[in-house]
C-alpha cells in the first residue's frame, strides 16, 4: 500500500518556531489549488500500488474551503485507486474548526483530524504566536467529537520557557480527559532563520533548556503509559487501534507521493522533493512540468534510513531484515556498534529486534548515528 501527502503552503499567521514552507498571503490560494490538482494528474505514474492513506498537511489545510479540499480528493480518486476504508487525514487549527466545516469534511470522506493545539495554556500559546486561545483548543476537540471525529490527534509542544512541569502535566491530562486517542508531542526546536532563532540571538528571550525538555519527555512517557497509550514512535502515542497509518507508512519505508510545493516523495530507491517556492511551482506546473530534485539512494543510504526510522518505532530494528537485505557482514558491524548501548541499557535485544529503552529514546538520534554504516 502507498500514501499521498498534499502540502497546502498557507497559514493564518507565522508561529515563532516554525520553519515549514508556507505563506501568510492567501491571495494565490485558488491558483495553488489549480496547480495541486494539475500535479496529481502529472504524477499518475509515480505510484503503482493502491492508495491506503491520504494526508492533507501544510501549512494549514483547514484554511481551504470545503470545495477546494473536495476537488483535490476527487482528483486523487480519479487518478489513483484508493482503497475502501483508506485513512484520510486533514491537519487543522482550532480557530478554523466550525460545525459547517466539520460536517463538510465528514461528508467528503475525511475520517481523521490532526489538530494543531500545541498547548492548553494561554501564556504558552501567546509566546508561540498561535492564532487560537486555550478555550478554542478545548472546544474544538469536543465539537469535532460531536461530529463523529473519534479518530483524531492533537499536537503538543513541550520544553517552552513559559511551560512549567505542572502546566505540562495539565496539558497532557487535559488531552487524556478529553478522550483524545492520539498524541504527537514534540520538544520545542530552534530552527535556523525562524523568529524564535532571531529572538534568542538578540537575547530577547532565553534559550531552550535541554534539561527541562528531557524531563518533560520522561514525564510524558510515564503519564501516557499509565493512561493506556502505546508509545509507538518517539514522538507519537496512540490508544489501541488509533495509530496514524499514514505516518507509520513513512517509518515502515513504504512508498509515498508528495504533491505541492516542498512536498517529498519516496519510491524505495530514490527520494525527490518539489521546489519550495510557490510562484515558481505554479509557473512550472502550468507548463506541465513538475519542478523537483531527485536523489538516488545507495544501498548504504537505504540501510541508514532504515536504522534511523526503525529505531524510532516501538517495534524496533529487525535483525532478520538487516541480514536479509544487507548481509551478514553488515549485521555483524551493526551489532558490534550496538554493544555499548546494550551494555548501558539504552538498547535491548529481544525477538530478533533491537529496541530503544525509555532512556535510549532520549538519545535516539545519536544512537542511530552510531549504528550507521
Image (spheres, rainbow, N blue to C red):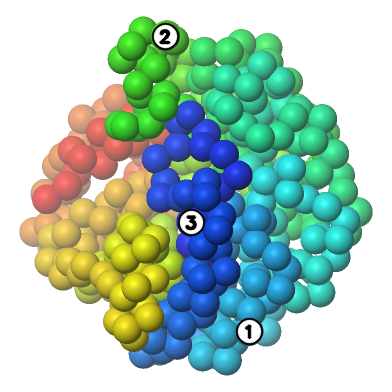
Q: Is residue 238 left or right of residue 337?
A: right
Q: CA distance from mark 1 to mark 2?
A: 47 Å
Using the image, tell me which numbered label, if any, was put on residue 74. 1
Secondary element under disc 3, as helix, strand or loop, is: loop
- 232 or 204: nearer the viewer: 204
Query: Is label 2 in a helix, a strand or a loop?
Result: loop
Tell me, for residue 204, which label it has, or none.
2
- Marks 3 and 1, the one that precedes in the sequence: 3
Q: Residue at x 51, y 20 (%)?
A: 159
Q: Nearer the viewer, mark 3 or mark 1?
A: 3
**Dot 1 alpha-carbon crowd within 10 angstroms: few under 14, some 14 to 19, many 20 or more:** few
Nearer-N-terminus badge (1/2)? 1
Using the rendered view, name the quadrant where residue 126 is placed.
Answer: top right
Q: Residue at x 91, y 54 (%)?
A: 146
Of circles 1 and 2, which is in front?
2
The local crowd at label 3, few if under 14, some if 14 to 19, many if 20 or more residues have their Cα within 10 Å, is many
**Lateral position of residue 225 relative to residue 26, left or right:** right
* Residue 357 visible in the current orientation: no
Q: Are marks 1 and 2 in contact (CB under 8 Å)?
A: no
Identity of the residue drawn at 21% across and 54% down = 304
Q: Is residue 51 above or below residue 161?
A: below
Where is mark 3, residue-wise? 9
> How far from the left and from the top, in percent, is residue 86?
64, 76
Position in image of residue 142 (x %, y %):
86, 44
Using the image as rendered, state which of residue 370 and residue 31 is in the foreground: 31
Question: At 52% from the left edge and 77% from the top edge, which residue is drawn?
Answer: 34
Give the SS element for disc 1: helix
Amino acid at each position: 500500500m502507498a500514501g499521498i501527502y498534499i502540502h497546502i503552503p498557507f497559514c493564518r499567521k507565522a508561529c515563532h518556531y516554525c520553519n515549514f514552507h508556507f505563506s501568510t498571503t492567501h491571495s494565490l490560494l485558488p491558483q495553488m489549488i489549480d496547480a495541486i490538482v494539475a500535479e496529481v494528474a502529472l504524477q499518475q505514474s509515480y505510484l503503482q500500488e493502491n492508495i491506503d492513506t491520504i494526508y492533507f498537511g501544510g501549512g494549514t489545510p483547514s484554511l481551504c474551503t470545503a470545495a477546494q479540499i473536495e476537488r483535490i480528493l476527487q482528483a486523487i480518486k480519479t487518478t489513483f485507486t484508493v482503497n475502501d476504508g483508506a485513512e484520510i487525514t486533514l491537519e487543522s487549527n482550532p480557530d478554523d474548526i466550525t460545525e459547517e466545516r466539520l460536517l463538510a469534511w465528514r461528508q467528503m470522506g475525511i475520517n481523521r483530524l490532526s489538530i494543531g493545539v500545541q498547548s492548553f495554556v494561554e501564556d504558552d500559546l501567546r509566546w508561540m504566536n498561535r492564532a487560537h486561545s486555550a478555550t478554542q483548543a478545548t472546544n474544538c476537540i469536543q465539537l469535532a467529537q460531536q461530529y463523529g471525529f473519534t479518530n483524531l490527534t492533537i499536537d503538543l509542544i513541550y520544553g517552552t520557557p513559559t511551560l512549567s512541569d505542572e502546566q505540562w502535566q495539565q496539558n497532557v491530562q487535559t488531552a487524556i480527559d478529553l478522550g483524545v486517542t492520539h498524541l504527537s508531542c514534540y520538544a520545542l526546536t530552534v530552527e535556523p532563520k525562524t523568529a524564535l532563532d532571531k529572538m534568542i540571538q538578540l537575547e530577547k528571550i532565553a534559550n531552550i533548556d535541554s534539561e527541562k525538555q528531557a524531563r518533560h519527555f520522561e514525564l510524558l512517557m510515564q503519564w501516557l503509559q499509565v493512561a493506556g497509550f502505546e508509545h509507538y514512535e518517539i514522538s507519537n502515542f496512540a490508544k489501541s487501534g488509533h495509530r496514524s497509518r499514514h505516518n507509520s507508512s513513512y517509518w515502515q519505508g513504504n512508498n509515498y507521493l508528495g504533491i505541492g510545493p516542498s512536498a517529498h516523495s519516496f519510491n524505495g530507491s530514490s527520494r525527490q522533493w518539489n521546489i519550495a517556492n510557490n510562484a515558481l511551482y505554479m509557473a512550472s506546473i502550468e507548463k506541465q512540468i513538475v519542478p523537483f530534485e531527485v536523489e538516488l539512494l545507495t544501498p548504504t543510504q537505504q540501510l541508514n534510513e532504515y536504522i534511523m526510522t526503525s529505531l524510532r518505532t516501538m517495534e524496533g530494528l529487525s535483525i532478520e531484515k538487516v541480514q536479509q537485505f544487507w548481509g551478514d557482514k553488515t549485521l555483524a558491524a551493526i551489532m558490534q556498534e550496538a554493544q555499548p548501548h546494550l551494555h548501558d541499557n539504552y538498547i535491548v535485544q529481544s525477538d530478533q529486534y533491537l529496541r530503544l529503552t525509555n532512556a535510549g529514546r532520549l538519545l535516539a538520534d545519536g544512537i542511530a548515528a552510531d549504528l550507521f554504516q
